[in-house]
Amino acid sequence: MTPETDIRLLLAILAPLIGAGLVMLTGRRPNLREGCSFVAAVVLFGITVSLIPEIRAGRVLTFTLFKILPGLSLTLRADPMSMLFAVSASFLWILTVFYAAGYMRGLKEHAQTRFNACFALALFGAIGCAFADNLLTLYLFYEIVSVCTYPLVAHHQDAEGYEGGLKYLVYLTTTAKALVLPAMVMVYVLNGNLDFAWNIREGVLPASAGGGLVTVLYVCFLLGFAKNGIMPFHHWLPGAMVAPTPVSALLHAVAVVKVGVFSTVRVMLYVFGVERMDALNLGMPTAWFVSVTILVASAIALSKDNLKLRLAYSTVSQLSYIILGVALLTPRAIEGGLVHIAHHAFAKITLFFCAGAIYVATHKKNISEMGGLGRTMPFTFGAFAVAALSMIGAPPVAGFVTKWNLLVGAVDAGSIGIMVVLLLSTLLNAAYFVPVVYTAFFGRATPVGAGVGAGSHGHGHGEGHGHVQAAEGEAPWAMVIPLTLTAAISVLLGFYPDLFMQFPKALFP
């Protein structure tokens, strides 16, 4: 395959980087500052969407930033898999800019300029990962995401914030340096370069590489990209819930965990390849390994009364669906797993948007305190219900498309056991989401002020330093509109799944 050089890839990573600089320059003028974030997000989305016609036509676009050594370069690539991540992340950044402005101003949060700048830098890293053409480029931008999101996790600058931020940084950088970096060196020794394959079948490792060595490298990459949330390297994720809710939305839907799981499946498909994984029997053991995370994380979510913590463990579980689908090595399963990168993003960002809106409007964080709130916040809890249906996998929402393809893929792979895992996990999803919706719409209303008691004092699990009285009714429109839109798009993707499904389908010409 002959790639075509396209400068739009450079412009795509420059958009959030320049946006971060403009945010810092205009920090004393909040409206202008948020305007710069919005313009950068729109420009990034526009550039990304402009690449779609070429990708649909079967072209692969590249742009080399630097040639460092023979076989080592910083190079960007746009192909179907990268577009799946880049389009969803860039679009959701636009909505998150609006939401974050309403949230941060509503709670009178401090350091809003730093917050917005780091947010843009995190998107710079995420888009760099999406468009990475080789392992070196992927690793560099992966680490950029880790470093740039640390100030967001530790935003409140209190003991809890620093503890959560430290755990976040130590887990993610240590695993990457201890496992991914040595594995990259070995791939370079074997190959003479770190480039990704041009298709998902063959991989790049030479046939002379022994099965034992390839298996060790595979495990290093699988566990080293710890942003993917696989147990036991998942503890950073619930700990990061000390961050403000827009950061939680960024972590879980737009950038951080998606960078982790995207990097994992990118390496599975474009370094090892379907045929090599099948020959070494790496697929099914991986599927069973991540099935433990799917079920255990769901069970833990059931025990959490704090809404953000329940959503955090839901994310740990849901991410492994993506890896599970790819590990089954059948076309339908791979398509279902990969499309979940986008489908999960829209549903999970809706859920976190709702959690933040509930806190801004009522100062309540615990599910047990939310009785009757669905009657006073119908848009927020209506959106929550739609997103919950997507997480459960019920039609006609986007999550159904994921679950259906995973189930069909499990049948194609001849694994009844994985089918049972998927069905059991669906029941667990319903068990921890349905009570939230039921409590909100049919539960007894909590007395005014009761939400600011135990479990709501302090800033635990990410809510702000501002001191705003709880209010009846919806949160500010700047928060409600984005969460309503993301919920509506989840439904749209249920009816028109090819909006994103076209990209993983293109991997099987």
Image (cartoon, helix red, strand yellow):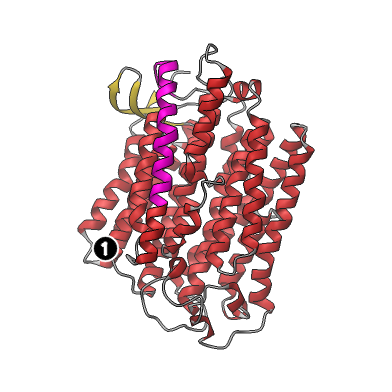
Q: Residue at x 69, y 41 (%)?
A: 406
Density class for disc 1 (Cα within 10 Å; few <14, some 14-19, many ≥20) is: some
Q: Check the picture and name the quadrant holding the C terminus.
A: top right
Magenta part of the chain:
168-195
In front here: 309 or 371?
A: 309
Q: Position of residue 12 (x, y in %)?
A: 36, 41
Whether the magenta-drawn stretch holds residue 186 is answered as: yes
Q: Which residue is mark 1?
A: 32
Asked whether residue 415 is in view, the answer is: yes
Q: Position of 105 compared to 208: left or right? A: left
Q: Residue at x 57, y 56 (%)?
A: 313
Whether the magenta-drawn stretch holds residue 424 is answered as: no
Q: Residue at x 30, y 42 (%)?
A: 14
Q: Residue at x 53, y 21 (%)?
A: 213
* Rendered view: 483 above or below 254: below
Secondary structure at badge 1 equals helix
Q: Position of residue 273 (x, y in %)?
A: 57, 24
Residue 212 is drawn in which quadrant?
A: top right
Type of the residue with mark 1: Leu
Q: Position of residue 310 (x, y in %)?
A: 58, 62
Label the magenta part by its dominant secondary structure: helix
Residue 279 is drawn in which quadrant?
A: top right
